[in-house]
Image (cartoon, rainbow, N blue to C red):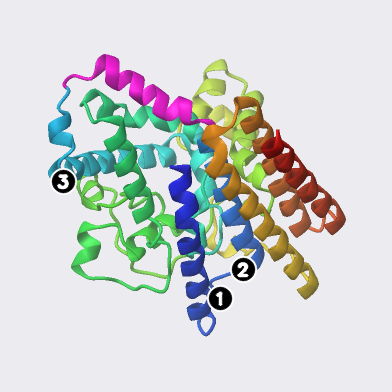
């Protein structure tokens, strides 16, 4: 899948550039630091996926080979078999997505996708690096049903790629299409923090599941994007760790042992009566939502773009060669790339100098050259 993402990346970036150009005369749909942050989080997510392939696809293959209730590859390898597998996958994705909003420990992973206060095509690339730890559980029904691993991998990729185009404000309502399929209008609702929109429209391709299980909401008022507890940071590592940290702190402070455990599995923000008494939280107010930004000079913006371009090339090279690397090289380069992208975030905060970022980039380049020559 890594090579497919690398090949698709120029298309993604071209469409992002087109959307940016089309939106220049309208409301401000893009911020440079936010866009860099979103795409960087997508880069790290793909690196994590490459490292965790044994956990995700490996477990799926093991369950398929040992526990599948039936084996019918002749069915699944037809066009209608692929279509059935895609619908089945989308059903499983709906429940992963829904539980990702309703169970705190799963929200801690999924929150990354919702942290941007903008809504554009770059937001689609903003993905978690920790989601692979538990997401695989929700797709085991496909393995038990005998969906071959190759078919599973293909429909998973189709479901993922479909969702890219729905992250835009430039496409309005689409009539009957909105009733059946995930669309820009439906997904804008999903990303909004408005009271009537919160935790709605979970479908990846189909809205059928939301209609069936009572989670559908039509877009009826302007959307306000982000999370109700804003990240206010361009640090990609903190973006992934923020909610885990908050849950750990809440669990540590809880007086009752049951609360220490329940805080991880209850809905995000849940408090027992005792916890609410110790740490009272006021209701969410839309008026309190402010768009986060750290101003950059024109020169700083140009440097940030150059460094981002280098990081994108480095991650693309990693994803292209990851399967042929030894595990030591794969983990070593992954840690170097995480460090490079983290420094990019620090630079956007004015907390790391251009010299430090350049030196880090040179170190990654030298390590890559050493690995290839070795």
Q: Which residues make up the magenta segment?
A: 51-70
User: Is residue 367 shown in magenta?
Assistant: no
Can residue 203 be seen here?
yes
Can residue 265 be seen here?
no
> Which label number is shown at residue 31?
2
Identify the residue at image location x=62%, y=21%.
255
Residue 250: x %, y % from top left:
62, 31
- Residue 60 position by quadrant: top left
N-term-proximal mark, 3 vs 2: 2
User: Is residue 57 shown in magenta?
Assistant: yes
Identify the residue at image location x=57%, y=22%.
260
Q: Quadrant of the N terminus?
A: top left
Label 3, label 2: how far apart the Cα atoms are = 42 Å
Residue 133: x %, y % from top left:
49, 29
N-term-proximal mark, 3 vs 1: 1
| Location of residue 335 with respect to 23 vertically, above or below | above
Residue beneath disc 1:
28
Residue 287: x %, y % from top left:
57, 65
Identify the residue at image location x=57%, y=56%.
39
- Residue 234 position by quadrant: bottom right
| Location of residue 23 with respect to 365 vertically, above or below | below
- How many neighbours does mark 2 have within 10 angstroms: few (below 14), some (14-19), or many (20 or more)? few
Residue 250 vs residue 10, the one in the foreground:
10
42 vs 154, left or right, is right
Residue beneath disc 3:
79
Residue 79 vs residue 172, the one in the foreground:
79
Helix, strand or loop at disc 2? Answer: loop
Residue at the front extreme? Answer: 373
Helix, strand or loop at disc 3? Answer: helix
194 vs 181, left or right, is right
- Which mark is nearer the camera, 3 or 2? 3
Label 3, label 1: how far apart the Cα atoms are = 42 Å
């Amino acid at each position: 899948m890594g090579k497919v993402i690398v090949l698709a990346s120029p298309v993604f970036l071209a469409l992002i550039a087109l959307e940016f150009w089309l939106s220049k005369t309208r409301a401000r749909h893009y911020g440079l630091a936010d866009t860099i942050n979103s795409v960087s989080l997508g880069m790290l997510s793909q690196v994590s996926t490459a490292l965790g392939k044994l956990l995700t696809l490996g477990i799926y293959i093991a369950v398929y080979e040992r526990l599948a209730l039936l084996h019918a590859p002749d069915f699944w390898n037809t066009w209608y078999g692929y279509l059935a597998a895609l619908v089945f996958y989308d059903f499983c994705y709906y429940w992963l997505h829904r539980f990702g909003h309703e169970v705190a420990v799963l929200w801690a992973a999924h929150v990354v996708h919702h942290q941007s206060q903008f809504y554009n095509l770059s937001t689609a690339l903003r993905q978690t690096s920790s989601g692979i730890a538990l997401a695989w559980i929700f797709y085991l029904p496909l393995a038990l049903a005998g969906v071959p691993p190759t078919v599973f991998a293909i429909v998973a990729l189709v479901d993922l790629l479909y969702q890219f185009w729905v992250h835009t404000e430039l496409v309005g309502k689409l009539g009957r299409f909105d009733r059946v399929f995930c669309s820009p209008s439906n997904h804008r609702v999903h990303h909004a923090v408005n009271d009537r929109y919160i935790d709605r429209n979970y479908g990846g391709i189909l809205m059928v599941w939301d209609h069936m299980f009572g989670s559908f909401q039509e877009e009826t008022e302007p959307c306000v994007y982000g999370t109700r507890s804003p990240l206010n940071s361009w640090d990609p590592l903190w973006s992934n760790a923020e909610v885990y940290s908050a849950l750990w702190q809440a669990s540590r402070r809880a007086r009752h042992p049951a609360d220490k455990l329940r805080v991880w599995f209850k809905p995000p923000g849940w408090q027992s009566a005792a916890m609410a008494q110790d740490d009272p939280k006021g209701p969410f107010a839309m008026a309190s939502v402010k768009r986060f930004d750290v101003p950059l000079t024109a020169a700083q913006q140009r440097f940030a773009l150059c460094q981002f371009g280098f990081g994108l090339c480095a991650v693309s090279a990693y994803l292209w060669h990851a399967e042929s690397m030894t595990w030591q090289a794969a983990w070593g380069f992954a840690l170097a790339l995480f460090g490079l992208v983290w420094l990019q975030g620090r630079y956007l905060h004015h907390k790391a100098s251009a010299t430090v970022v350049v030196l880090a980039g040179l170190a990654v380049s030298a390590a890559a050259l050493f690995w290839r020559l070795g």
